[in-house]
Amino acid sequence: MSAENPEQGFSFTDKRRVDPETGQVRQPQAGSGDTGAAEPSEAQEQAQAAAAGGRLDSDGPEVATGGEPAAETEPAAEQAEAAAQSEGAEQAQGTAQAEAPTASGAETGEGALDPENVSPANDTEAELLDHLKRINAEYAAYRMRSQREQDRAKEAGVASVVEALFPVLDEVRLARENGDVEGPFDTHVTKLFDTLAKLGVTQYGEVGEEFDANIHEALMQQPSDEVETPTVFLVMQPGYMLGERVLRAARVGVQAPAD
């Protein structure tokens, strides 16, 4: 409203954009000075949509609530269903790809990697397979050689320690034979020989055993009518063996059969 003349009372200008009687959109008057007339308002857009919906003939698409065609909802539903199917396919593909390495790993077990179980398909594969077999054989030989070297090194270490203990072991033996090792000292001596036995060291050389030049060293010999074969009758120093290796031959006196 605008007060153009106070004496004439109140007057107003109808600026409604939609005619309330006909429902048609009014055209803005030229030079009206209304800057907002050029831009359609929300009410004008709704009126235009309602008028357009009323003028649709029977051949047009059905109008849903809010003036939007109902046919537009069907493509949206189809798109949602297609997206769900695509997502399910991607998940199935990912699961298959995740299971593929497991199956492949199961096929490449210990038996599958054995060159003896592989049949070459061409000359190149045959050459590579032969090369792999040679490498496996060389590696097996290397492991065996390394193990033998380790065993020899261990045996040499034990032998060097036992050889250094020969004088002590001889004194202990003589002291035990003379009854000088008693009580707790005898216990210590027993533990010493038990420890040597755990390392594979054995003491040998007893009176009455048959003389063997491979393990005995005869320091004296005398004839005797009481024996039929050379026999040890005196042990001067016992012998020691590490496994099958003689560390020190037993030094003995031998009785030989009389002629």
Image: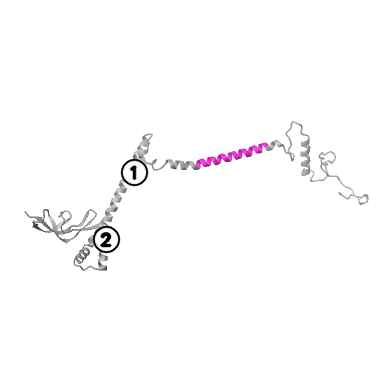
User: Residue 127: horizontal and vertical position, in percent?
Assistant: 35, 37
Left or right, residue 8 beside residue 164: right
What residue is shown with label 2?
Answer: 194
Residue 18, image x and y in percent?
Answer: 82, 41
| Residue holding disc 1 | 136
Q: Is residue 94 magenta?
A: yes
**Mark 2 Cα shell of 10 Å, populated few (<14), some (14-19), many (≥20):** some
Mark seen at residue 225: none
Q: Residue furthest right?
A: 7
Q: CA gap, disc 1 to disc 2?
A: 42 Å
- Pick the residue in front: 139 or 95: 95
Task: Tell which circle, 1 or 2, labels the residue nearer the N-terminal end.
Answer: 1
The percent position of residue 227, horizontal first and vertical second, equals: 11, 55
Residue 40, x across and y down, in percent: 77, 43
Bounds of the magenta span? 74-97
- The answer to whether residue 41 is visible is no
Q: Determine the residue positioned at 57% across, 40% down.
A: 88
Q: What residue type is labelled 2?
A: Asp
Colouring method of the image: one colour
Q: With 62 as the anchor, is 81 left or right in this view?
A: left
Q: In this view, does 153 lie above or below 108?
A: below
- Which residue is drawn at the image coordinates 50% and 41% (left, top)? 97
> Which secondary structure type mostly characterizes the magenta part of the structure?
helix
